[in-house]
Image: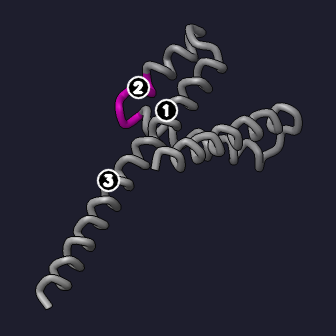
């Protein structure tokens, strides 16, 4: 479970890095949209916990550089992916336990 979350985090961050580098080298509407869609996951997560507005204010007032915002977004993405892995893994583990328990009862009751 943790290995998959780690791999997914690395892939997501690498895609984001490639998109940002490509956007700086070859600005296009497609790359801008792709960059915005990659940023939507951490932005919504930060909005959900109430941290997006202070981050936005700090960025526009010049207290945090763009690199800092990218770092916060990257870390947020990793946290979201690991939390999703934890929730999905827990649910699947619980479901697997219930199915195994049900199968054991059927074998024992026959």
Q: Residue furthest bottom?
A: 110
Identify the residue at horizontal 20%, vertical 77% (top origin): 104
Foreground residue, 37 or 100?
100
Q: Contact, CB < 8 Å: mark 2 with mark 1? A: no
From this view, report whether residue 74 is shown above or below residue 29.
Answer: above
Rendering coords of residue 50 (x, y %): 36, 28
Judged from the image, the secondary structure of the residue bearing numbered disc 1 is: helix
Residue range (magenta) = 47-53
Where is mark 2, residue-wise? 51
Q: Quadrant of the C terminus?
A: bottom left
From this view, report whether residue 17 is shown above or below residue 63.
Answer: below
Foreground residue, 106 or 34?
106
39 drawn magenta: no
Q: Residues within 10 Å of mark 2 (few under 14, many from 20)?
A: few
Q: Tell me which numbered mark, 2 or 1, is placed earlier along the sequence.
A: 2
| Disc sitting over residue 76 in the figure | 1
From this view, report whether residue 83 is shown above or below residue 104.
Answer: above
Q: Does residue 21 appear anywhere in the picture?
A: yes
Where is mark 3, residue-wise? 90
């Amino acid at each position: 479970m943790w290995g998959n979350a780690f791999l997914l985090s690395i892939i997501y961050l690498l895609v984001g890095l490639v998109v940002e580098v490509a956007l700086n080298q070859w600005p296009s509407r497609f790359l801008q949209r792709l960059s915005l869609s990659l940023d939507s996951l951490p932005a919504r997560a930060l909005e959900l916990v109430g941290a997006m507005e202070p981050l936005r204010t700090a960025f526009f007032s010049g207290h945090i550089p763009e690199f800092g915002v990218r770092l916060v977004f990257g870390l947020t993405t990793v946290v979201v992916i690991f939390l999703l892995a934890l929730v999905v893994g827990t649910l699947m583990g619980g479901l697997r336990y219930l199915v195994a328990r049900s199968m054991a009862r059927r074998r024992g009751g026959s």
